[in-house]
Every structure is written in structure tokens, then in C-alpha cells.
Image (cartoon, grey):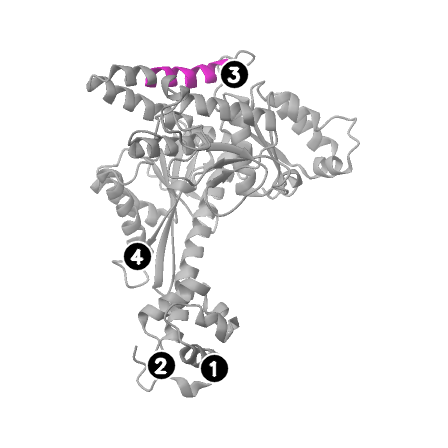
Amino acid sequence: MNTKKRDTLLHFIKTLPHTPGVYIMKDAKGGTLYIGKAGRLRNRVRSYFSKQISSPKLEILQKKVDRIEYISTPTEIEALLLEAHLINTHHPRYNTLLKDDKRYPLLKMSGEEYPRLTITRRKEGKKGKYYGPFTDATLLREAVLFINTIFPIRKCVKLPRTPCLYYHLQQCLAPCFREVKTEYDCYIKEIHHFLRGNKKSVIEFLKGKMKEAAGSLRFEEAALCKRQIKALETLRLRAFTVADPGASITLSGSIELKKILALKKAPERIMCFDVSNIQGKWAVASRVSFYREVADKENYRRYKIRTVHRIDDYAMIREALSRTLTGLKNGRESFKPDLIVIDGGKGHLNVALKVLKQEGFDTIPCIALAKEFEEVFTPKSQKPAALIQNGPAHNLLRRIRDEAHRFAISYHRSLRKKEMSASQLDSIKGIGKARKMKLLNHFGSLDEIRRASVDDICKVTGFTKALATRLHRFLRGDQGLISPNNSL
């Protein structure tokens, strides 16, 4: 690393807060090199640039670092959760530490009817949902203890016949002796939000629940919600006893967007749309959602375009955006964005603005990011907005746009592959629509069916030895097996 670059980074490090958080080291091309967590961001990041570094790995990393981004979190527990999520999303080259899931702890939400949260060292079976791996087992145990205190889910390995102490302490809904499935599932959903870093959503959920309980004169339940909210907010305040009083979540890209686009607030929730098609065929649209600059895959959506049968990106964007806004209006969607990004130019933006106005969402800011010159178009000016090239805002928008493009392309390819595979199978005698779908669902693709043996094909429901042999021979070139009229 040259002296000028080192001095620039050291000057930036001096501006980092003393709060917990996650730091992200990037190279000159914007690629993610390393992601880590810290109890105090400034002290931890500064240690990487100490003159006493002896590790060859750190020396190489130090030379490649071009810039550092960070997300300040209220607590170190939340930094731990966010670190694991970001590593699993971006797979940084130098985070080899977490490649061995058997060594580092994972959080497991069991796949039972009434799930419980445990710590494990390995993934076992297909049931259940896993989070992590995590770098700090002690801190992870604290996180589980806190979650189990705040959320009244079961702690027992086996459901007892009578309510245990946790029920009487109001730390369990007691599914062992009463029907609470709907309420229980709501809490499991909120735990997932919490583990993804969305504590604000959890507090909003609890406030709504408290208001509803009080309105129905269920005062004991309302009081429980109030204590849970207080615990979450206390957790937030406790983290700032050693921090700058004005500090909160620091999102450099979002803050720069607020300034450049003259927004009322820094956008926490950003939604981006893209379309993909080949000469109008297999037309699809994608929608990706980011919360606090982190991909929120629970709120990704993909749309098979229904109303457009020609090459018309404008009409496709119109359909996809309209379907999202309709979902928001009727309650199917809950992720209301602070900013909408359209992959395209001024024309795409104008179409989106008309849809937003027609559907009654014209208060949501909307911009377009053009691919060719990375220009950002806004409703307020005919000229592109002046974003700093490779600055935090530009990098954030580009990352979100690229993710929307990837998501659209992957869906487009899967539809095209499925249709092409299905069309070839249509030509085989004795294979109708039902058997065709069973084959594709069992093997996944036409290539896998080609590689299958006759015995493998016989394992698919509805395939006799004779039919499996006919299919096997056909896929290896015996065209005499094609039906004369291509009928199903």
C-alpha cells in the first residue's frame, strides 16, 4: 500500500465511531475483501493498520484495501448477527474463518410445529432454519438468552403435559396445553426479522400487539408487550454509554443519497425493479429489497409478465410495479419502500412515476439508474444527478441494481430452460403433461434426465420399465420414437 493511500485510510479511521458495528473492507474495484464485527469500530479497524502486523494474510489484505465502509449498530449482539448475514450474502475472499460450519456455532430454528431456538455446530437434516455461522460463541449465547426472554417461544426439548415455569414467567405461550399456533407463528416471523437486523420492525409489531390487546381489555397481555418493547429499547440505549450521543445507525450510502436527492430522510428501505426478456419471450421482472443497505431476501419478488407480449420494457416495468403497489394496498406486501429504484433511463422513470401517481403512492421517491453510463435520473431534473463516482451512494445503488439484474436473469434462465426442456419431452410417445412435470420435478433439468439410467427413471411415479426405456433411448438419439403428431 502506498503512503498516500495509507494516510487517506488512517484519516478515515479517525472518523469512525466508538460504537459496536460491522466494517466492510473493499478493493479498488468495489469487491468485498473482508467483513468483521467490532465492539468499538474505530479501535478494531485501526488495529489492521498497525505497523506491528506480522501475519502474511493481514499484510496482503492491507495492501489490497482501497476503502472501508461500516454500519454502526446499537449493540454488539446485533453486530454479530449482521456480520454473519453479510458474510453469507457477499462471501468475502478473506473471511476463510467461517468456511468450516462444523467449527463455528450456528443458530437453529427447529422445524417442529412449535419451533425453538438452539445453538449447534453442524447442520443436520433438512428440517429447520439455520443462521450463521457466528464468530463469537459467548456473545451468541447472550443473544439466544435475550431472544428467549423477549419472545415467548418454547424452551423445552419435549412439550410437557402441563405448563412449566416459563409460562408462569410469561416467557412462553405454552403450546403444550393450548392452541396458540397463529400467535406463535407471528413471533417466529418476528424473531427472523430480529436475526436479520430489523429490530425496528419487531418494536412496531409489539406496539401494534400492545395497542390491540389494550383495546380488547387484555391488560396483562398489553403489559407483557410493553415490557418487551422496553427491553428492546433498553438494549439499544445501553450500547451508547461509551458512544457519541448523536450516533445511531450509520449508513454512508443512504446518508449521501438523502443529501444528493434532497430526500426528507435517509432511505432505510430501498426497492429496485428490473426486467429481462429475449425478443419479448419469457419476459420476467424482478424486485429486490434492501433494508439498511443489506439485502432483505424475504422481500424479493419475481414476476412472470402477463400483459405484455412484445419487446416493451416500459410496459413490463409498469406491470411489475403495479403488482407490487396492489400488494401493498391489499395487505399482501408489508415492505413499503422509502425509495424506489428503476433499472433504466428517463423513460423508465417517467413510466414508474405515472404508476405511482395512479396507485396513490406518489409520495414515495423514485429514481432510475441507467446501465451504460451509470447515470441517475430523478423527477426534479432533466439532467442526471451528480453522484460521486465510486462514492458510497453510487456504490450502494449499483450494488442494488446489479442484484436486481442478477435476480431477473436467473428467473428468466430458469423459465427458458424449463420451457425448452418441456418442449423436447413433448415429442415422446406416452409422456403427457403430468409425467413431463414429474420428470422435471424429480431430476431438475433435461440434462439430468439425459444422464439418468433406465432404473433411475423407473423411480419416478408413473414410469414403467418400457416407458423408461423408450425415454432413455429417445434422449440418446433414437428419433424413431417421436410421435407422428407430437400429441400429448
For the stretch drawn in magenta, what is the main secondary structure? helix
Q: Residues within 10 Å of mark 4 (few under 14, many from 20)?
A: many
Q: Which mark is residue 305?
A: 4
Q: As rendered, which of 325 and 11 lies closer to the eye?
A: 325
- Amino acid under disc 3: Ala
Identify the residue under disc 3.
239
Tag 1 secondary structure? helix
- Amino acid under disc 2: Lys
- Amino acid under disc 1: Arg
Mark 1 or 3: the one toward you: 1
Identify the residue under disc 1.
473
Q: Are the residues at dot 4 and dot 1 in contact (C-beta closer than 8 Å)?
A: no
Q: Which mark is residue 268?
A: none
Question: Visible in this render: residue 103?
Answer: yes
Q: Indicate whether residue 229 is drawn in magenta.
A: yes
Q: Earlier in the sequence, mark 4 or mark 1?
A: 4
Identify the residue under disc 2.
429
Q: Are the residues at dot 2 and dot 1 in contact (C-beta closer than 8 Å)?
A: no
Q: Residues within 10 Å of mark 3 (few under 14, many from 20)?
A: some
Q: Indicate whether residue 236 is drawn in magenta.
A: yes
Mark 4 or 1: the one toward you: 1
Question: Residue 424: image x %, image y %?
Answer: 40, 75
Question: Residue 141: image x %, image y %?
Answer: 55, 25
| The magenta segment | 225-239
Q: Could you give the CA–CA distance between mark 2 and mark 1, rounded to whole angstroms? A: 12 Å
